[in-house]
Amino acid sequence: MSEQPTATAPPEPAPAPAPAPGPEAAPAVTTETTLGPTPAPAPESSNTPLPDEPTTPLKELWATAKAHSHPEIWGVTLQDPTTHVPSQIVLQKYLNANEGDVIKARDQLTKTLDWRQKIQPLELIKQTYSKEKFGSLGYVTTHSSTEDKTKEIFTWNVYGNVTSIETTFGDLEDFIKWRVALMELAVQELSLPTATEPITADSDADPYKIFQVHDYKGVSFLRQAPQVKSASTETIRVFATAYPELLKEKFFVNVPALMGFMYGFMKLFVAARTIKKFHPMANGANLAKEDFGGSKVPLVNTLPPEYGGKGADLKSQGKEPAVA
């Protein structure tokens, strides 16, 4: 606001009145006259839709992944899913795991990226683990069809080979690292970085999944051990978050009395439709008789004989994280 003139200051002359315009000079009612001069275009803000902004659930997940500082999941360096099939597979799995709910899928994707950035699972594969702790406890086997490129991947957890609860499960962090390394070995066998066939919202038609076998033959101590309880709880929690839609079916073999304990923890973290994929079996030798979801691979010819198959024994044909 300008200063008021003093008593001694001469009065300012009044401006001359402007001549009244004739009817032909009357201004037209325009945006410029009613709202002032048209402003220059404002810089595009985050609220202004851009041509490449997310318009589909997959693109929304891609935007979330692109904004994260960790670029990789399951060996796939994430790229635009509209042009990169491996990324489409990974991101679609997060949508499928959450039944198409983008908000939940985005949250799970972010948690996975955070976890992988912290844990570095691909580096865990390169480590050597204690043979005393983890030797002969976990394997990965790959079974292929001779007629086409179809293959089935199995992970095997042979808890009957545990010789000491404290040795194997006492260090929870070490156990989880070894268990993640085993899972990453199995995921590598899916060859996701070179996959060429995308997946759809039909989870049952997704071929990029793994069978899991947990063998409890000779095990009688797991239910009571607090170390095992902690390891089971943490493993289920991590896998439910960081490895969605990778399980085809899970078989618990040689487990007559243990299932109530295991199911109790699984139901806390695993979706109900996933629980339906779990199959308890009292006799592991009957495993090869299973249908395995109608697999085209003749698994009875290659599964280990201790599980009813005609292939080499598990230790011979399986691979495990390096131990020494």
Image (cartoon, rainbow, N blue to C red):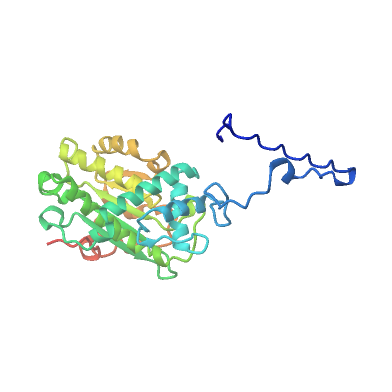
Left/right placement of residue 90 relative to residue 170 reads: right
The furthest residue to the right: 23
Residue 72 appears at what percent x and percent y?
36, 59
- Residue located 29% across and 55% down the image: 183
Task: Pick the quarter of the image with the C terminus.
Answer: bottom left
Q: Is residue 20 above or below residue 6?
A: below
Q: Is residue 196 above or below residue 100?
A: below
Pick the front one: 53 or 38: 38
Task: Pick the quarter of the image with the N terminus.
Answer: top right
Pick the front one: 60 or 67: 67
- Residue located 20% across and 39% down the image: 230
Left/right placement of residue 312 relative to residue 39 reads: left
The furthest residue to the top: 7
Pick the front one: 295 or 308: 295
Task: Please indicate, yes or no, whether residue 189 appears anywhere in the rendered image.
Answer: yes
- Residue located 20% across and 38% down the image: 229
